[in-house]
Image (spheres, helix red, strand yellow):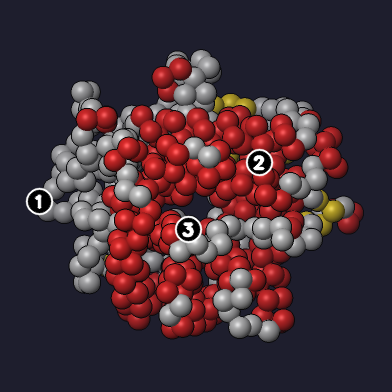
């Protein structure tokens, strides 16, 4: 990537305005045409959203987009749409014990609505606020209950993926928002014999375990961990649930356990940046957690911040060197069709190439991580990287300008190994389609930058201290 090519934020503002104009029509059209009895819209095929049975992890993105559209434009119809659909359809996600996706579904809906009330943007009574807060408390506790204890083995623990108690996904770092929000609201998970379980402790333990096993730092942990690959991310780590020991890297949506699935890396970059942002802003007291954290090689707030910072910076630096000049990335950096002479530093991406698909959703997620990390570390290269990616996403050929296409951001990839993504008749690799997570994270990025450009308060998942 070449962050020096990034426009300044004010020059990007016109593209943000155009993006929100396009979003208005597409959000309304999807709500009007989607048959809820089919399940949840996941990704587009020939420009129309369709479902894909695997897990219901995208419904919060659909309604979260409407809420974010209101955030950016004050168009009341989108507030009413997002609020109404949240009440109608999101309750099962609050109590869902079988997934690792609570942050995606519930922070995107109940969390955004609560944030807007606190900002004075929604005229709501006390009980509406309590309704959202009860949902967030329950969601954080339910998510924390999906726990694999590594005491006696690798140490610490983690919230396991839908694959089962052996499985630690990189994606799940963004669901730690649910645990942190519930903790900040004063909630705990009640366990056997009425034992209260601290939600922040579980969020921190999960993050430390993720940073230790899912992120590589060029230290020779395996044959594919040279210094040049520092920041490599594995989608999944596998543990022996009998003794708590680490076994091996794995992947579900990437090419191999020894290459980087770029959306997985983007989850890490964004997730650790926002968790670090929370620690820096709120300075939670971790002293009571010291006995718990000590098994995870941390003894206090400074140690935890250092672990988070290391993971975020390593993945940011990896992304900078493995992305094209416009900030876009292949779906997996080790995908077999990538030309051996690929020149990331000397060329822009081509989503219509014949080799391997570009994944714009990875870029949308990573851009938010770059911005938040850049603000935290006062690193202008990271801020410019975010602006460069935003400039690319909010321009053709990545911006979906055709009103007949229901997606917002084109060239998103869901599951390349399973062959789920649509390949147009005149193309050799998937391209031209959108996804709910790509559209939602582009919306989050656009709203975040729109607020900064208009000197409005920053957008965080937690309440900033007064």
For the point 71% across and 70% down, the residue is: 134
In this figure, what is the number of numbered marks?
A: 3
Q: Nearer the viewer, mark 3 or mark 2?
A: 3
Precedes in sequence: disc 3 or disc 2: 2
Look at the numbered discs 3 and 2 and tell me whether their residues touch, using CB distance below 8 Å.
no
Which one is in front, 163 or 205?
Answer: 205
Look at the numbered discs 1 and 3 and tell me whether their residues touch, using CB distance below 8 Å.
no
Give the Cα distance between marks 2 and 1: 44 Å
Residue with the mark numbered 1 = 426
Secondary structure type for disc 3: helix
For the point 67% across and 60% down, the residue is: 463
Residue with the mark numbered 2 = 206
Name the quadrant of the C terminus: bottom right
Name the quadrant of the N terminus: top left
For the point 43% across and 83% down, the residue is: 77
Secondary structure type for disc 1: loop
In this picture, residue 328 sits left or right of residue 376: left
Which one is in front, 90 or 365?
Answer: 365
Q: Nearer the viewer, mark 2 or mark 1?
A: 2
């Amino acid at each position: 990537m070449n962050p020096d090519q990034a426009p300044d934020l004010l020059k990007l503002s016109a593209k943000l305005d155009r993006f929100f104009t396009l979003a208005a029509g597409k959000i309304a059209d999807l709500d009007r045409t989607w048959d809820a009895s089919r399940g949840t819209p996941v990704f587009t095929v020939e420009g129309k959203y369709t479902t894909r049975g695997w897990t219901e992890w995208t419904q919060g993105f659909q309604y979260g987009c409407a809420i974010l559209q209101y955030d950016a434009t004050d168009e009341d119809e989108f507030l009413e749409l997002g609020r109404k659909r949240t009440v109608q359809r999101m309750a099962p996600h609050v109590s869902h014990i079988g997934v690792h996706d609570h942050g995606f579904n519930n922070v995107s809906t109940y969390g955004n609505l609560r944030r807007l009330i606190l900002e004075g943007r929604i005229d709501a009574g006390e009980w509406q606020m309590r309704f959202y807060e009860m949902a967030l408390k329950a969601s954080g506790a339910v998510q924390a209950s999906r726990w694999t204890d590594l005491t006696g083995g690798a140490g610490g623990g983690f919230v396991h993926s839908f694959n089962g108690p052996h499985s630690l996904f990189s994606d799940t770092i963004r669901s730690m928002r649910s645990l942190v929000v519930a903790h900040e609201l004063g909630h705990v998970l009640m366990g056997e014999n009425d034992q209260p379980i601290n939600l922040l402790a579980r969020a921190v333990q999960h993050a430390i375990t993720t940073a230790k096993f899912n992120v590589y730092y060029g230290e020779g942990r395996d044959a594919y961990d040279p210094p040049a690959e520092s920041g490599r991310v594995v989608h999944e780590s596998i543990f022996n649930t009998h003794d708590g020991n680490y076994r091996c890297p794995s992947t579900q949506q990437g090419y191999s356990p020894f290459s980087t699935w770029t959306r997985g890396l983007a989850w890490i970059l964004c997730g650790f940046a926002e968790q670090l942002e929370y620690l820096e802003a709120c300075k939670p007291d971790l002293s009571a957690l010291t006995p718990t954290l000590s098994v995870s090689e941390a003894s206090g707030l400074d140690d935890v911040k250092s672990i988070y910072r290391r993971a975020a910076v390593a993945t940011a630096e990896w992304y900078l060197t493995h992305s094209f000049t416009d900030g876009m990335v292949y779906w997996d950096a080790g995908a077999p069709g990538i030309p051996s002479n690929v020149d990331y530093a000397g060329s822009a991406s081509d989503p219509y190439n014949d080799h391997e698909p570009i994944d714009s959703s990875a870029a949308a997620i990573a851009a938010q991580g770059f911005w938040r990390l850049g603000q935290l570390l006062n690193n202008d290269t990271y801020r410019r990287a975010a602006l460069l990616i935003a400039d690319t996403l909010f321009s053709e050929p990545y911006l979906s300008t055709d009103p007949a296409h229901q997606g917002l951001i084109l060239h998103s990839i869901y599951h390349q190994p399973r062959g789920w993504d649509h390949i147009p008749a005149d193309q050799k690799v998937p391209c031209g389609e959108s996804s709910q997570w790509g559209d939602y994270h582009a919306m989050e990025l656009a709203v975040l930058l729109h607020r900064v450009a208009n000197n409005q308060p920053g957008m965080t998942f937690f309440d900033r201290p007064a």
